[in-house]
Image: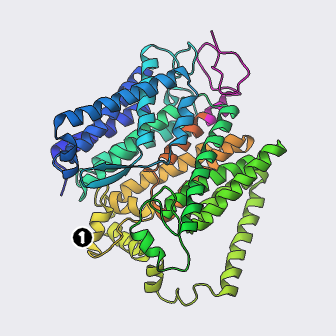
Amino acid sequence: MNASAAQFIGILIACGAAAGALLAGDARLRYGCALVALMAAPMLIAGDVWDSSRLVALRHPPEKLAAVVVVAIAGAAVVAAVFRRFPWSFPIAAFAVLPLRVPVHVGSQTSHLLVPLYVVIAGGVLCFGYAALRGRSERGDDAPPPAHPATLRDSPAVVWLYRVLAATLVLYAIQSAYSVDVSNAIENASFFLVPFALLFVMLGEVRWSDRLLGWILVTVSAVALVFAGVAFWEYAARDLFLSKGDLLASNQLHLYFRVNSLFYDPNILGRALALVLVALGAYLAWARNTGLAIAAAVVAGILLAALALSFSITGFAALIAGLLVVMALRWGIRWAVGAGVVIVAAMAIFFAVSGVGREDLSSSDKINDISSGRVSLISGGYHLTRDRPLWGFGSGSFGAAFKDRIDPTAKTTASHSEPLTVGAEQGAIGLIVYVALVVLALIVLLGGAGGSVGAAAVAACFVAIFVHSLGYADFTVDPATWALLGVGVALRRKRVAGSEVPVAGGTPAPQPGDPRPAAA
């Protein structure tokens, strides 16, 4: 069913306002657009599910819904006050809750939402917006907010990256008009694209220092250790903490037991662990403090063991890709290519000698069964793209189109590959924007990244998440993608401008552990 006029206008307002926040040169206009997007996204969701059982249970009696709204606004205001008092707490909080999903029970259904991240984003928009209204920087000093990159004499790649990100949002909204699953398009836009775009804008304006990046690494490592601890418990108990349905049943059919920790898919756990491992790898490549290097290596070993228990092939592929990028930035491309050749050769020898999968991979049907239907998804995605090569079936439509045209009995209809998703849903138009986004992001993040451990870690993690998305999808709908781009843009500007991100007047505020006194 195509989008109604109200649905199309709603998604256009939400995505258009977020795009305006990406492109606006004036700080007041930028956060005005951000506030509109922040309010439009939940209203869009509510309008789409207004008569569903889950929302009916929430809005009856009306006082119940009003209480939820009041609590949400009050919570965001408190968080904004904390961010304003301690500017460094915003980026640390954002990365701390980046992967955390909370089960929300409404009516008879349960949704797993990034509630902590939404609270951080809402608080950040209020905090940065308040500072913009007062004409001050939200970095702890009295300087005006920094101008938007598109209004500075910045590199064309950075300027066009902002424009392509904005185009991604607007195109997604436009192509929802003819989507065969407009509800899914609304959910993707409201839960993912719009709030993550606002996160990108704010992280791009943070004054990043090596000290702050160090605290971020400590924070995400600590969170990852919690994930690993839960994974070890699951493996020892042969039970799952969450999501005990299909995965637990699947575990009974294999000789191995796949853990998922606090996530709902082992591959999501694999992605989260792989990103932290890549960041730790970058730190170790540049480490000078022996004690800290040993601690980082121990943490990396624990996380690697947890990743192994997830049996996530895409997680290991992402880890290898990210570490190869670290190697290339630290020691040169020749070393990275050599290491890649050794890895491929070792894998070929292992499969040849061990005979693993020799019988199972003898037919496409067996491969399809082993890969949880991914062969069918790949071929089906190709056929969907071929059927509508120019404009696709509309935003968020892959699952519905696959069931309707390819396999009505399919248990899994998620494409598990970002290019397939974009091709089937948005056609050649969407693929052009997607390729432009990836190319521009790589140019911005990799350019000169070898001179900084922070920039190298961000670039390597972005490559890791891109590789992971080729086998699992979730590229633009993963907050890590936008967060890494936001940090990467800020670090790129810092490298170009010199030792500090340019601030109009005043002295930059100290970050955690910074020996300089705060500006008066």
**Magenta stretch secondary structure, dominant:** loop
**Of helix, strand and loop, which one carries label 1?**
helix
Residue 83 x/y as whole percent: 51, 25
Task: Residue 31: name its quadrant.
Answer: top left
Residue type at mark 1 is Asp
Q: Residues within 10 Å of mark 1 (few under 14, many from 20)?
A: few
Residue 280 x/y as whole percent: 69, 49
* Highlighted range, magenta: 491-520
Q: How is the image coloured?
A: rainbow
Residue 210 x/y as whole percent: 70, 34
- Which residue lies at the image location 53% right of the left edge and 65% below the top edge? 259
Q: Outermost residue toward the front?
A: 237
Please indicate whether residue 166 sits to the left or right of residue 321 in the image: left
Task: Residue 255: name its quadrant.
Answer: bottom right
Which residue is at the front of the view, 65 or 488? 65
Which residue is at the front of the view, 44 or 424? 44
- Disc 1: which residue: 404
Q: Is residue 27 above or below residue 519?
A: below
Does the rendering let one see residue 449?
yes
User: In the rendered image, which quarter contains the N terminus?
Assistant: bottom left
- Which residue lies at the image location 46% right of the left edge and 29% below the top edge? 124
